């Protein structure tokens, strides 16, 4: 019998010694395990765990009214009975006074990898039975792509990711991979829904060993694995679209693009070509024009054009490119450039979106949709694009554009959040803190005393994945894992199912919520339902008891390797795309008819709202990429992330020239600042980043010092701007951020306190 725990960052074995000490070890079947995940065992029992329900003092003294003290108040421990009664009373009062649309339970976040204990599924099931809620749509990771891709290639985001050409297929036919935004291996350590085995490093290495060349177009050298010996082309952040337009210009002027492919498989090229040649706005998208924007020498642009046209080329686009001002454009332009090269639908090239952004992209697997916890139907139609949460709180009843529609923000009186932390993933956190004061009540299910818990009114202590049984069934991973309970609930914490069951009992629909099933009943239901569905696909599943005993099950490898849009390539009439034309839409009439001012009918260069081409007061571009030692903000309190800090602060990578100009040395505490806020970080001087660019990874737990008006730990989202990519998709734009930095003075340096529990009051005053 094997004991496994599967997480978003990998699968581990666990054991408990005679002293009841829990240990995790890497699974020997994983060729490239994630070491920081071993720290989950330490984090699960640290002093930051929330041991029992708590209520914020100011809210308890004046229930149902905001006092502006969220994030600065003390907390009072209460019993489960009292906490459940307080929360259920608030839910019922909000519903009766304002309607269910006044409840926001969008509850965005990665939570944990279990299929049954998936926090958002639990939230949806509970609130749908309660009458509905205002919800959110999209992901912070790829919101612009989620809206754009159906218009351009007729596939939704998840289908696009699942249909990517596999590493094995590429390794046999491709000759050149051009990586816009790189392929950082650290990002491939994770995959939403769980990781059985890490395969990305092996896949990339197989391509390299088979002779494929790699070009890294990024401000960061280490955005490409070192073993690739990739050619480096440093580029100003947010200017990839201009470079690709210049490459298209060369192909058009030299008549070297694939006309047959363009005619047979695309629409709208002529209009796009007119723009590129300057016939629409008297500005040619020439290499000379692009060089001034990108800071790439003209000669290099011509050389790159020669390379991509002379070799079988894959245009690889990082997810990060579209988390920026007008982030739809580099993705749309990358697809257009790939169409001009003519390899789409073959294993010799085409385009990719997210190779190495997560582990699953490029892996060989048959997509297997799994049974989830039944969630019912939401009767409330109000929703927001996920990154517009602050706008929603600031502008109740206000109008906003989204995907060609005029929508209205709901008037939110109560927020319920489980499985996520907006004080990690949202932008302009000082603005969010102010907007967060507006609702009457905020309720959270939270594991640790992070910034999310400290800005809530009622806190239910939640379990970690180690404290419950579950299934890891990821539709984009061929390994299924039996997640077994490794430890008892920490102190008086409960899992989300138990929490919502308690609330459902208070509100009178316990039986409807649980269907008289306990945790293991639901897990067996999910397994049996999935097993029956997939037996029709000739996949023979073991009995649940056998699977649970062994601990894992491997799905059979596909008989053939996937090639994205291969059927369409073979016969576009028989297998048309789900676009109005049935083809790749280089120009989109649908988008043109939206008459937007920030997203036109075809790929276009829009100057970012702030960038190095127009930097005055704040001369450095901030990149807030994914961290190496944790998943987003998860496990920032674990040894791997804590050990990476510099004098207790999150490291900021600074080019040696920029550091020298500011008299900054390795290990110095520095202040990054702009009009939106100030952040302390630890200086890490490195020429892995180009001059004019600094890197402060996302995920340091938000730790504001309200007296000094600064964030003292190193959370970059204090500095990022909260504005949508465009009125088409309204995605986040965290990668369009200018800052300045200097050495912090002694009066500004305050100790990080987010890893200490907040002050508790034993009783009401």
Image (tube, rainbow, N blue to C red):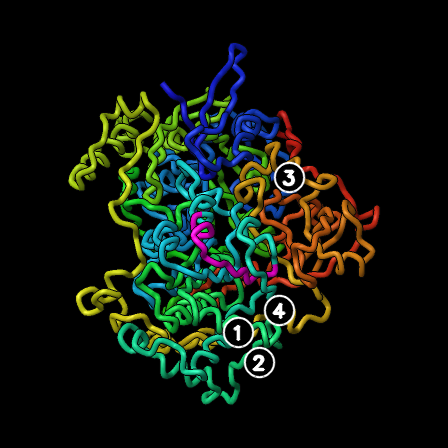
Q: CA distance from mark 1 to mark 3?
A: 48 Å
Q: Is residue 99 magenta?
A: no
Q: Nearer the viewer, residue 76 or 51?
A: 51
The answer to whether 611 appears left or right of 179 in the picture is: right
Q: Secondary structure at mark 4?
A: loop
Provide residue 193's location: percent of width, then percent of height: 39, 41
Provide residue 764's location: percent of width, then percent of height: 61, 29
Which badge, 4 or 2, comes first in the chain's sequence?
2
Figure quadrant of the C terminus: top right
Provide residue 231's location: percent of width, then percent of height: 56, 60
Q: Secondary structure at mark 2?
A: helix
Residue matched to label 4 = 610
Figure quadrant of the N terminus: top left
| Magenta region, residue range | 206-219
**In the image, is residue 402 above or below residue 113?**
below
Q: Nearer the viewer, residue 455 or 683?
A: 683
Depth check, mark 4 against mark 2: the one in front is 2
Label 4 Cα crowd, 10 Å radius (few <14 / some 14-19 / many 20+): some
Q: Secondary structure at mark 3?
A: loop
Labels 1 & 2 near each other (Cβ < 8 A): yes
Provide residue 165's location: percent of width, then percent of height: 35, 55
Q: Is residue 213 magenta?
A: yes
Depth check, mark 3 against mark 2: the one in front is 2
Which badge, 3 or 4, comes first in the chain's sequence?
3
Residue 73 numbered mark, or none: 3
């Amino acid at each position: 019998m094997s004991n496994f725990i599967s997480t978003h960052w990998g699968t581990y074995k666990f054991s408990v010694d005679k002293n009841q000490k829990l240990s995790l070890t890497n699974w020997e079947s994983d060729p490239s395990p994630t070491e920081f995940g071993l720290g989950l065992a330490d984090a699960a029992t640290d002093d930051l765990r929330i041991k029992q329900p708590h209520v914020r003092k100011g809210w308890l003294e004046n229930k149902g009214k905001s006092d502006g003290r969220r994030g600065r108040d003390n907390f009072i421990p209460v019993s489960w009975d009292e906490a459940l009664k307080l929360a259920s009373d608030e839910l019922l009062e909000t519903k009766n006074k304002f309607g269910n649309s006044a409840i926001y339970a969008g509850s965005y976040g990665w939570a944990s990898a279990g299929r049954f204990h998936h926090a958002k599924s639990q939230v949806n099931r509970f609130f749908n039975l309660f009458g509905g809620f205002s919800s959110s749509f999209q992901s912070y990771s790829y919101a612009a792509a989620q809206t754009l891709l159906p218009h351009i290639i007729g596939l939704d985001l998840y289908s696009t990711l699942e249909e990517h050409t596999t590493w094995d297929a590429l390794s046999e036919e491709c000759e050149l991979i051009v990586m816009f935004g790189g392929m950082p291996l650290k990002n491939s350590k994770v995959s939403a829904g769980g990781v059985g085995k890490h395969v990305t490093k092996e896949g990339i290495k197989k391509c390299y060993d088979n002779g494929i060349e790699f070009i890294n177009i990024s401000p960061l050298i280490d955005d490409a694995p070192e073993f690739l010996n990739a050619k480096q082309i440093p580029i100003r952040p947010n200017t990839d679209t201009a470079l690709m337009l210049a490459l298209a210009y060369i192909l058009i002027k030299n008549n070297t693009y694939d006309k047959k492919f363009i005619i047979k498989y695309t629409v709208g090229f002529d209009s796009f070509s007119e723009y590129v040649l300057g016939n629409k706005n008297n500005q040619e998208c020439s290499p000379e024009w692009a060089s001034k924007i990108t800071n790439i020498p003209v000669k290099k642009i011509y050389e790159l054009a020669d390379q991509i046209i002379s070799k079988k080329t894959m245009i690889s686009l990082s997810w990060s490119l579209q988390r920026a001002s007008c982030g739809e454009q580099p993705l749309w332009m990358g697809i257009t450039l790939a169409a001009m090269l003519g390899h789409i639908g073959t294993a010799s090239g085409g385009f990719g979106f997210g190779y190495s952004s997560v582990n699953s992209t490029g892996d060989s697997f048959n997509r297997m949709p799994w049974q989830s916890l039944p969630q019912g139907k939401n009767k409330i139609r109000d929703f927001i694009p996920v990154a517009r949460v602050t706008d929603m709180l600031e502008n109740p009843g206000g109008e906003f554009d989204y995907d060609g529609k005029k929508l209205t923000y709901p008037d939110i009186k109560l927020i319920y959040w489980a499985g996520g932390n907006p004080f990690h993933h949202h932008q302009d956190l000082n603005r969010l803190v102010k907007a967060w004061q507006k609702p009457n009540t905020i309720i959270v299910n939270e594991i640790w005393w992070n910034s999310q818990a400290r800005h809530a009114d009622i806190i239910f202590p939640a379990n970690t994945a180690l404290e419950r049984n579950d299934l890891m069934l990821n539709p984009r991973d061929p390994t299924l894992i039996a997640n077994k309970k490794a430890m008892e609930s920490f102190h008086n914490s409960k899992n989300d199912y138990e929490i919502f069951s308690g609330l459902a009992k208070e509100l009178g629909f316990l039986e409807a919520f649980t269907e008289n099933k306990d945790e293991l009943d639901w897990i067996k239901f999910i397994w049996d339902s999935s097993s029956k569905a997939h037996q029709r696909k000739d996949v023979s599943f073991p009995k649940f008891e056998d699977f649970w005993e062994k601990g894992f099950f491997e799905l059979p490898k596909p008989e053939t390797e996937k090639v994205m849009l291969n059927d369409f390539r073979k016969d576009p009439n028989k297998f048309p795309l789900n676009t109005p034309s049935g083809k790749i839409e280089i120009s989109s009439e649908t988008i043109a008819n939206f008459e937007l001012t920030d997203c036109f009918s075809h790929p276009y260069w829009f100057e970012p709202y702030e960038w190095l081409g127009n930097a005055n007061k704040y001369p450095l571009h901030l990149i807030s990429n994914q961290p190496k030692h944790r998943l987003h903000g998860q496990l920032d309190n674990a040894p791997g992330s804590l050990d990476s800090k510099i004098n207790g602060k999150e490291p900021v990578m600074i080019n040696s020239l920029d550091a020298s100009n500011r008299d900054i040395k390795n290990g110095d505490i520095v202040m990054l600042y702009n009009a939106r806020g100030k952040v302390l970080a630890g200086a890490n001087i490195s020429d892995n980043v180009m001059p004019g660019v600094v890197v402060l990874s996302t995920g340091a737990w938000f730790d504001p010092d309200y007296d000094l008006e600064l964030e003292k730990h190193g959370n970059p989202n204090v500095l990022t701007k909260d504005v949508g990519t465009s009125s088409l998709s309204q995605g986040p734009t965290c990668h369009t951020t200018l800052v300045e930095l200097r050495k912090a003075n002694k009066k500004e340096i305050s100790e990080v306190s987010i890893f200490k529990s907040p002050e508790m009051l034993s009783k009401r005053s």
